[in-house]
Each structure stands twice: as C-alpha cells, then as structure tokens.
Image (cartoon, rainbow, N blue to C red):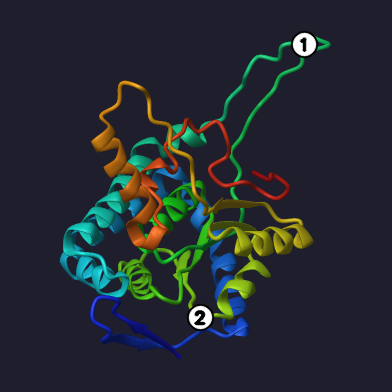
C-alpha cells in the first residue's frame, strides 16, 4: 500500500494499493490489445476524444486542483497554474496534431537518380510508458501522454509514489467518458521497473542517477527512450540586465520545489521535426 501524505501539514491524503509487476504487465497487455482500434480512428477521431477529455478536465478543475495541491504541497494558485499548462498542452496538440503527423517529402540534396524520393512519416510505438517526478505530476504527464495519444499509441503513466493521486483521478476520468481503453496509470515502487520491462517506448523525467538505470534497461531491450534529467543549469546575466530581477529569478529557479523545479513550459514547444512518438528502433 502507498500512503500519500500532504507536505503542507503531514495529514494522510489517501492510501492506495501499489501494483505488483504482474499487475503492471497485465495493464500494459490490455493497453496493447486496444491500440489497433485506437489507431484505426485516425488522427481526427483521436483528437475528438482529446477534446472530450479536455472538457471533462475543465469541468473537474476545482476538485483536481484541490487534489493536486494537497499531494504536492502547492498553493491553490500554483496547482491551478499547473492544471492550466495541462489544458494548454491538450489544446496545442488538438490544434496541430494532424499537421505534425502529416507525411513530408523533403528534397534530397545529392541523389543518384531523378526517380529517388525521400518520405518522412511519424510512426507511433504501441504502448508508451511515461515515468514522471513529483514536481509537476499532472502537467509533465500530459505533456508526454498527449502527443503519444494523438499519434495513435496507448499510454501508461507511472507517477511518483509521492504524488500518484491526481493522475489516478485523471485516468479514471478518461475511463468514465467511455473513451477507448488506451490510457492508464500504475503506482508503487515495483511499477517503474515493470513498466520499463514491457512497454515499447519510455519517456522519463527525473534524476540523473535513475535516468542511467532507465537508459540501460531500455538499451537492453532495444527500445527507444527519451530522458529529461535533473541538474543545475547555468544562468547567463547580460551586462544590461536588471540585477535585482535577475537575482530574484535565479533564486526562484534554483530553490522552487526544494531545488527540483522544472519549468514544463519549455517542453514540447519546439518545431515538430522529429516523430511525436518514436517507433521501434527510432531512438531520440
């Protein structure tokens, strides 16, 4: 069992069951069985379900923000800001997902014959595993899950054992809509390694030490992975900067969330020149 404690006051928010490796494998197998039907909907059909899901999130905003704040220790304003990032992400991929997935035919610079053509497609892995940190459990999960779902993959999210409740509520919301069963969460200390052992693509956000373990396990199975690892970034202060504002900004960036802060707005905003979700053999 996992006991989730509110950082703000030490009260027990909830106690939930932790998945065993066998239960994780069963969940992933169930997701994989549903990917064919999900993919057959086409990008327009999948985006339609994201719109329905987005509307459910908005209708449930008050309760989800309260739950997110309770398990992370964030203020209501901070939790609501993270919730807003999740909505913005869904809007982004609903608006641009079809364009991102469209095939491209770039010109070949040095081709041996005029008949040669180059086509770039955007394949999706069957089941994408998302392993996230406690700092932004909702926003970071949606950042990785939304493009995978649009691309036609199923998604299993393994949130931090410190903050699993919001993602569990979100997954139950997806299920309550009658949406195809291609989105789920698993929890517990044994769930992360089990996810690594059975999904087709891994997206990990967390520490460098754990990232090394994720990379090695992914390499052993020859599956693609993408790692967003922690660390202290350098700050460049230009000569004409307001030093008081610069100092305040650097202190906030270095100390927020106990020094484990990550501004998730920097994620998934680059031009989509790479596959949204790498297929087998396409390492990022």
Which x, y percent locates residue 77? 17, 58
- Rendered-image quadrant of the N terminus: bottom left
Residue 268 placement: quadrant: top left
Which mark is drawn over residue 188? 2
Which x, y percent locates residue 245? 24, 37
Q: Kindly identify the residue that appears in the image at 36 percent across and 70 percent down.
A: 175
In the image, is residue 76 above or below residue 118? below
Which x, y percent locates residue 7? 30, 76
Q: Quickly name the residue at label 1.
A: 110
Residue 15 placement: quadrant: bottom left
Q: Is residue 211 left or right of residue 247?
A: right
Q: Nearer the viewer, residue 208 or 250?
A: 250
Question: What secondary structure is marked by label 2?
Answer: loop
Alpha carbon separation for disc pair 2 and 1:
52 Å
Which x, y percent locates residue 154? 52, 60
Question: What secondary structure is marked by label 1?
Answer: loop
Q: Which of marks 1 and 2 precedes in the sequence?
A: 1
Q: Nearer the viewer, residue 199 or 259?
A: 259
**How many residues crowd mark 2 within 10 Å: few (<14), some (14–19), many (20+)?**
many
**How many residues crowd mark 1 within 10 Å: few (<14), some (14–19), many (20+)?**
few
Residue reaching furthest to the top: 114
- Rendered-image quadrant of the C terminus: top right
Q: Is residue 268 left or right of residue 32?
A: left
In the image, is residue 166 above or below residue 148? below
In the image, is residue 138 above or below residue 46? below
């Amino acid at each position: 069992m996992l006991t989730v404690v509110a950082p703000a006051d030490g009260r027990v928010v909830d106690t939930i069951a932790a998945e065993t490796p066998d239960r994780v494998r069963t969940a992933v197998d169930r997701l994989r069985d549903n990917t064919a039907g999900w993919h057959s909907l086409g990008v327009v059909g999948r985006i339609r379900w994201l719109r329905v899901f987005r509307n459910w999130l908005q209708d449930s905003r008050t309760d989800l923000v309260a739950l997110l704040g309770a398990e992370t220790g964030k203020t209501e304003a901070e939790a609501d800001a993270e919730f807003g990032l999740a909505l913005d992400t869904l809007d982004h991929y609903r608006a641009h997902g079809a364009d991102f997935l469209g095939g491209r035919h770039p010109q070949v610079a040095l081709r041996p014959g005029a008949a040669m053509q180059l086509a770039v497609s955007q394949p999706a892995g069957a089941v994408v595993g998302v392993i996230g940190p406690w700092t932004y459990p909702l926003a970071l999960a949606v950042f990785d899950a939304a493009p995978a779902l649009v691309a036609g993959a199923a998604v299993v999210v393994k949130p931090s054992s410190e903050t699993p409740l919001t993602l569990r509520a979100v997954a139950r919301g997806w299920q309550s809509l009658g949406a195809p069963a291609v989105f789920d969460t698993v929890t517990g200390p044994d769930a992360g390694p089990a996810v690594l052992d059975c999904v087709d693509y891994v997206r990990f956000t967390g520490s460098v030490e754990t990232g090394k373990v994720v990379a090695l396990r992914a390499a052993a199975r020859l599956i693609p992975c993408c790692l967003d690892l922690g660390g202290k970034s350098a700050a460049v202060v230009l000569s004409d900067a307001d030093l008081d504002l610069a100092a305040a900004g650097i202190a906030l960036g270095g100390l927020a969330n106990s020094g484990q802060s990550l501004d998730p707005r920097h994620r998934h905003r680059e031009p989509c020149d790479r596959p949204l979700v790498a297929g087998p053999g396409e390492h990022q």
